[in-house]
Every structure is written in C-alpha cells, then in structure tokens.
Image (spheres, grey):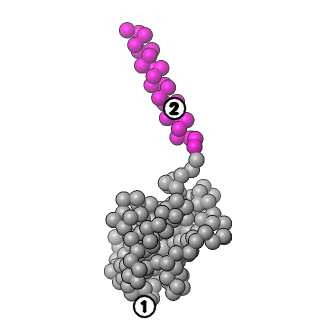
Amino acid sequence: MDWIKIKCRTLIAGVLILATTLSFSGPVFAEQSVGPGSGDLRSTNGVTIYVSKRLKTLSLKQNGVLIKEYPVSLGASSSEGNKNVEGDMRTPSGEFYVCLRNDKSVAYLALGISYPGIKDAERGYADGIITEAQRDEIISANLAGKQPPWDTPLGGFVEIHGCRTSGGTTRGCVALDNDAMDVLWSYCNLGVPVTIGP
C-alpha cells in the first residue's frame, strides 16, 4: 500500500514540475494580457495602429516602419465630430490601446479599444454625462491598462473588426476586410497603442 502512495506522490510532483516549467517558458504570444498600466512589462513588439478618419485608412506600423495601410469603414456620423455619447454613431478620436482580443466576434475577429479614455471620462463628467464614480472607474481602468467600463452613457464596445463592407459604415467601430484583420490579429497584443485622428 505504501508503494502506491509513493507512486501517487511522485506522479503529482512530476505534474506540478511540468506545469510550472510550461508556465514560465516559451514565446510570448499575442494573447498575453498586458496594457499601458504595466509600464515596461508591455510586450507590444513596437507595433502601433493609426486610423485616419478623413482618409478612412488604418496604418499598421512596427518600430515606425509601415507594414501596410488598409481601407476602413467608420461610424456613420463620424464626419460630425468626436464620439460624445452612446448611440451617436461616431468613431471616437484620441489615444487608445488594444484592451480586448475576441476571436469569436460576429464580425470575424475583433480588437477592442480602450474607449472611453481618460480625457473622455473627464469631459463626460464635466458635461454632466457621467457620474464621479463612473469617471473614476474609467480613469482607473485606463491607468491599469485594462478594459474601461463600456456601459456608461459615454458608450463603449468600440472595436477594430472584420466584415468591412466597401462604402459602408459602422455604428462607431473601425471595420476592415477580413484578410486585413488576419494581419492585425497576428501583430496586435493587448496594449498595442491605437491612435484615431484626422
């Protein structure tokens, strides 16, 4: 009976050693959860995204070198200004980061962006759109590099996703063709900076 206990203990020890070894070795994949609040721990591999609302393009760069530029569809009312509230059909402008990766999106693949950002929260509170608690929760999430609340009156759930329709619009997201989304998916870790500008 003692030899069974010894074999069980040996087997359990072996499994624990194997699990520990696997958890600390191997390459860093795009699924690793990191964000701007993690400081130097980010593993974004020098990748950045810039979306031009005027040109309706997305530029993917690594270490400042353009990898590719893609056509995009934007929020139907984006030409009327920056995103202000939920349901205004506008793509937000500003400095964001990838805060979510969704490979089960109804729009093929999706990279969630960290809207509302800190400036959005401060504006929303100053304009009486959100509460002080909501402002503080959004700011805290952004400072920690996490997904901010997407259920406030400022709106949220803004993504870069596939299923673009040529000449079409979105409810506020940035839509690309699926083959372009495949490329973005392969490059973009959580924490990758996303700038949406003119």
For marks 2 and 1 on the same chain, the one whose residue lies earlier in the sequence: 2
Mark 1, other Cα within 10 Å: few <14 / some 14–19 / many ≥20: few
Q: Is residue 87 magenta?
A: no
Query: Which quadrant holds residue 137?
Result: bottom left
- Range covered by the magenta-colored residues: 1-26
Q: Nearer the viewer, residue 169 or 79?
A: 169
Residue in view at x 52 percent, y 30 percent: 17
Element type at marker 2?
Answer: helix
Q: Which percent across, then down, holds residue 109? A: 41, 63
Query: Which quadrant holds residue 84?
Result: bottom left
Q: Which percent across, then down, holds residue 131? A: 37, 75
Q: Nearer the viewer, residue 148 or 107?
A: 107
Residue in view at x 56 percent, y 68 percent: 193
Residue in view at x 44 percent, y 75 percent: 174
**On screen, 37 above or below 13?**
below
Judge left or right: residue 50 versus residue 165.
right
Element type at marker 1?
Answer: helix
Q: Is residue 16 magenta?
A: yes
Identify the residue position indicated by label 2 in the image.
18
Mark 2, other Cα within 10 Å: few <14 / some 14–19 / many ≥20: few
Judge left or right: residue 103 versus residue 187.
left
Q: CA distance from mark 2 to mark 1?
A: 56 Å
Q: Amino acid at mark 1?
A: Glu
Identify the residue position indicated by label 1 in the image.
80
**On screen, 188 above or below 152?**
above
Q: Which percent across, then down, holds residue 40? A: 63, 58
Q: State which quarter of the image contains the N terminus.
A: top left
Q: Amino acid at mark 2?
A: Leu
